[in-house]
Amino acid sequence: MAVASESAAREPGAEATNSTDATARRAPGWWAGVGRVVFALAALLSFTGNGLSFYIGSWKDSDLPADAGFSGGFEGGWEHLLNQPTYFTFLANFLVGLTSLLLAIRPHRTSNLFHALRIAAVVCIVITGVVFNVLLRDAPPGTPVEHVNDTIQHIITPILTPLVWLVFDPRGQVTWKRIGLAAIIPLAWLAFTLARGPALDWYPYSILDVPRMGYDGVAVYVVAILGFFFVLAALMWAIDRLLSRLISSRAR
């Protein structure tokens, strides 16, 4: 029995995992406190951006992209306010806010569900920043509150979130199983958006304009963005493994 126990203790990865866990338990109290404050501020920022989106929707009509192949939309008021969560930007910011808040409450989380949500949050918010600023940005925001909302949701949060993940998130939690689970979220959003579009004659973004580009044209953007999703997730996996090994080596 002693031999079997000793062999089990020396299984590949077991020592690294134990060392990482031990390092996490020995983390200085002040550093853990700083992390919780940063997570709380990140959650507040994301939720503030979404709150401003609700406010803007309460008085502003939805925008119709130039040369749009659809003509539907939402009038300012309850109609446009309640439609805000269907934008990918809102979803990504919500995921960042939710996971950041949960980490502020309890930083060392290990569940598959939570870390799938966290991976989705980090990757989706980076995609939001890149796609919006590269492909979708046209006219500047029209009012000061729209400018603040745009800056939070499309610039600050997409830059801040991966930096917070890099510095403060628990290590050794990015796995391919969790990446696969994380991918369900954007895929579900896409399926919902494309199924809903014909009924409303409305699509949230010009790159999803099926009436103008057809499904073949939209598929080019969809495949490229999904590929970008997995590239970013793979980069998270590689960085997470590297940092886990560094922590493990220091703990020996």
Image: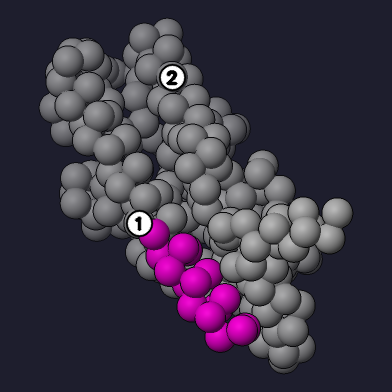
Q: Residues within 10 Å of mark 2 (few under 14, many from 20)?
A: few
- The three-letter code of the residue at mark 2 reads Ala
Mark 1 lies on residue:
235
Residue 191, numbered circle: 2
Judged by depth in the image, the label closer to the viewer, 1 or 2, is 1
Q: Secondary structure at mark 1?
A: helix
Which residue is rendered at x = 13% and y = 27% of the image? 67
Q: Position of residue 129 (x, y in %)?
A: 33, 55
Which residue is rendered at x = 50% and y = 30% of the image? 184
Magenta-drawn stretch contains 183: no
The part of the chain drawn in magenta is 238-252
Q: CA distance from mark 1 to mark 2?
A: 26 Å
* Direction right: furthest residue: 1
Viewer-side residue, 53 vs 9:
9
Quadrant occupied by the C terminus: bottom right
Q: Position of residue 2 (x, y in %)?
A: 84, 60
- The three-letter code of the residue at mark 1 reads Leu
Establish if 114 lies above or below 184: below
Establish if 210 lies above or below 99: above
The answer to which quarter of the image holds residue 37 is bottom right
Quadrant occupied by the N terminus: bottom right
Which residue is rendered at x = 34% and y = 24% of the image? 203
* Direction top: furthest residue: 199
Q: Residues within 10 Å of mark 1 (few under 14, many from 20)?
A: few
Q: Main secondary structure of the magenta part?
A: helix
Viewer-side residue, 178 vs 212:
178
The answer to whether residue 211 is visible is: yes
